[in-house]
């Protein structure tokens, strides 16, 4: 009986060790998320977007990083509707994410869906009121359709933060000119000429304020 008991213990022990080795082997064979992402980046660097997408779908979990990256890859591929779908999912998973909303803007702009673009900039500015990029482009959207009064507060905010940045100064100058605020426009055109002394746009604008 003791002999059989010893054999049974050895058999159970052997089976336990074999089972552990099998589990370790299976775990080692399963790719990690980081290795999947690394492979996806490698495919993307070679513009193999389909492969970059497929390998990423090996991650079964519905997580922010996967959806964000799929949004980007489908955008690179030119499938803007699917890109928006994944960026929307990323936003659902992380509602306070500014980067996901900026990502959403890319395919929406390609589709010329300016209402959706504007809504995302508005959402970003609720999360981050001083976000330079969102303020600049939200103002630019209004400027491009001639809504200069609506553009002004966005441009003012960026110009106050970056008073020696040519792009915002010249844009704010012209916006002020179209609002018939010549004194403000004159100051800004002069400021633009300090940043870029050869600016034809600033010189033209300044001549119009005299």
Image (cartoon, rainbow, N blue to C red):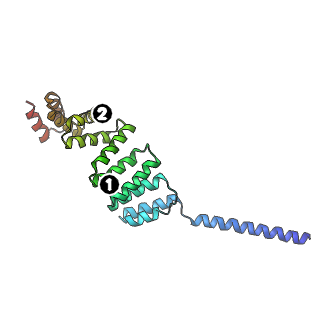
The location of residue 156, given as percent across then percent down, is 26, 33
Q: How many marks?
A: 2
- In the image, residue 92 sits, relative to residue 11, either above or below, namely above
The location of residue 3, given as percent across then percent down, is 89, 71
Q: Which residue appears at 81% of the width and 69% of the height?
A: 10
Tell me where residue 128 sits by quadrant. top left
Provide the residue designation for mark 2.
Answer: 161
Q: Which residue appears at 28% of the width and 55% of the height?
A: 111
Of residues 10 and 103, which is closer to you in this image?
103
Outermost residue on the right side: it is 1
Q: Which residue appears at 74% of the width and 69% of the height?
A: 15
* Mark 1 → mark 2, Cα distance in angstroms: 29 Å
Outermost residue on the front side: it is 115
Tell me where residue 8 sits by quadrant. bottom right
Q: Nearer the viewer, mark 1 or mark 2?
A: 1
The location of residue 131, given as percent across then percent down, is 34, 39
User: In this rendering, would 100 be left or right of 4?
Assistant: left
């Amino acid at each position: 009986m003791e002999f059989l008991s010893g054999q049974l213990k050895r058999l159970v022990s052997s089976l336990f060790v074999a089972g552990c080795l099998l589990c370790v082997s299976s775990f080692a064979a399963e790719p990690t998320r980081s290795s999947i992402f690394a492979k996806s980046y490698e495919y993307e660097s070679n513009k193999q977007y389909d492969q970059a997408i497929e390998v990423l779908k090996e991650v079964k979990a519905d997580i922010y990083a996967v959806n964000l990256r799929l949004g980007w890859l489908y955008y690179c591929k030119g499938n803007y509707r699917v890109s928006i779908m994944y960026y929307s999912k990323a936003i659902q998973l992380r509602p306070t994410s500014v980067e996901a909303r900026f990502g959403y803007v890319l395919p929406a702009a390609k589709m010329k869906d300016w209402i959706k673009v504007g809504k995302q900039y508005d959402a970003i500015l609720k999360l981050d009121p001083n976000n330079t990029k969102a303020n600049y482009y939200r103002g630019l959207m209004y400027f491009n359709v001639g809504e200069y009064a609506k553009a002004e507060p966005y441009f003012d905010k960026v110009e106050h933060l970056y008073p020696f940045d040519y792009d915002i100064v010249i844009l704010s100058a012209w916006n002020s000119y179209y609002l018939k605020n010549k004194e403000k426009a004159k100051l800004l055109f002069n400021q633009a000429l300090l940043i870029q002394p050869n600016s034809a746009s600033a010189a033209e604008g300044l001549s119009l304020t005299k």
